Amino acid sequence: MTMSRMVAAAAAIGALALGACAGPAGTGGDGAEATGPGRATEAGLAARGNEPGWTLEIADGRLVYVGDYGETRLEAPVEGSTRRDGATVYRAATEAGPLTVMVRETLCGDSMTGMPYPRTVTVETPERNLSGCGGDPAALLADGPWRVVALAGETVPADSAPTLDFDAQGGLAGSAGCNRYRATYTLTGEGLTVGPAAATLMACPDRAVGERETRFLAFLETVRRFSVEPDGRLVLHAEDGRRLVAARV
């Protein structure tokens, strides 16, 4: 271990001890009707799509659409929202004509980067219909906590499995197997990275658990993106192709 990592680990041990009894971070969703993390409301929605590139934002009752890679901009008050075919529908009367946004609380993958998003969004403009993704990918990570079920092809026993508890502010914590750990994570438009983890220094009574703990903490530093499987399991992908698969606790 390098000197910088030793200092980071020592600084975090006290915080780990204080936070060991803390509950899991809150998940997305803000109402009884929510069917997925971070349900869209008129108070806030951000979406994006490709070919041609476009972005959409609904905030404080106003809608702003920027299309054609920034060449088109439409802004207007949101007239209200309704439910149709399992989607929340927003409408606005822009200077170029009516604009309709349909938001479904279903998993969406960015067509360029593969980044998963919690919502599927369709935008109907006067000129064309566009499909894209909406919401914050961090809401999917924070929809845990998660228990590791497989690490680099190895099935992990439930009674000694590492856990992952992401919060929406870029924090990650959990059990590495027998020690508690904390780390930070960063989401960009391209993927996910996890900073070096600081862990408590308790000796693992079981050698196999201790060795798996070491592999788990090392794996976190190699993560480059994440995905969500159809059954809801979280997958962290390492830069060399290895995978960590986790299920909700």
Image (spheres, rainbow, N blue to C red):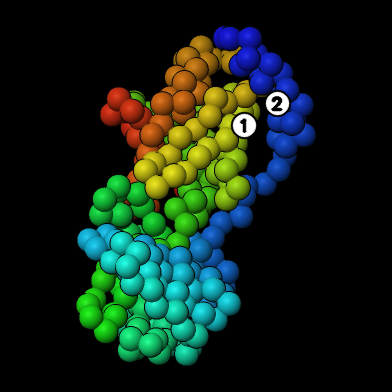
Amino acid at the residue labelled 1: Arg
Q: Is residue 136 above or below residue 233?
A: below
Residue for badge 1: 182
Instruction: From the top left corner, tell me how far across and down residue 34 is, in percent.
Output: 49, 71
| Label number found at residue 35 | none
Q: Secondary structure at mark 2?
A: helix
Callouts 1 and 2 close, C-beta under 8 Å: yes
- Which of the 4 quarters of the picture holds residue 13? top right
Under circle 1, the secondary element is: strand
Within 10 Å of the Cα at label 1, are there few (<14), some (14-19), or many (20+) other Cα atoms?
Answer: many
Residue at 26% of width from left, 71% of height from top?
A: 130
Q: Position of residue 142 (x, y in %)?
A: 53, 50
Residue 55 lies, with reference to residue 239, above or below; the image says below
Residue visible at 30% across and 55% down in the picture: 109
**How far from the left and from the top, in percent, is residue 98?**
34, 88
User: Where residue 124 sits in the image (x, y, percent)?
Assistant: 29, 80
Instruction: Out of 214 and 111, give the one closest to the viewer.
Output: 111
Q: Quadrant of the N terminus?
A: top right
The residue closer to the viewer here, 56 or 162, is 56
**Which residue lies most toward the front here?**
71
Report the residue marked by disc 2.
Answer: 12
Q: Amino acid at mark 2?
A: Ala
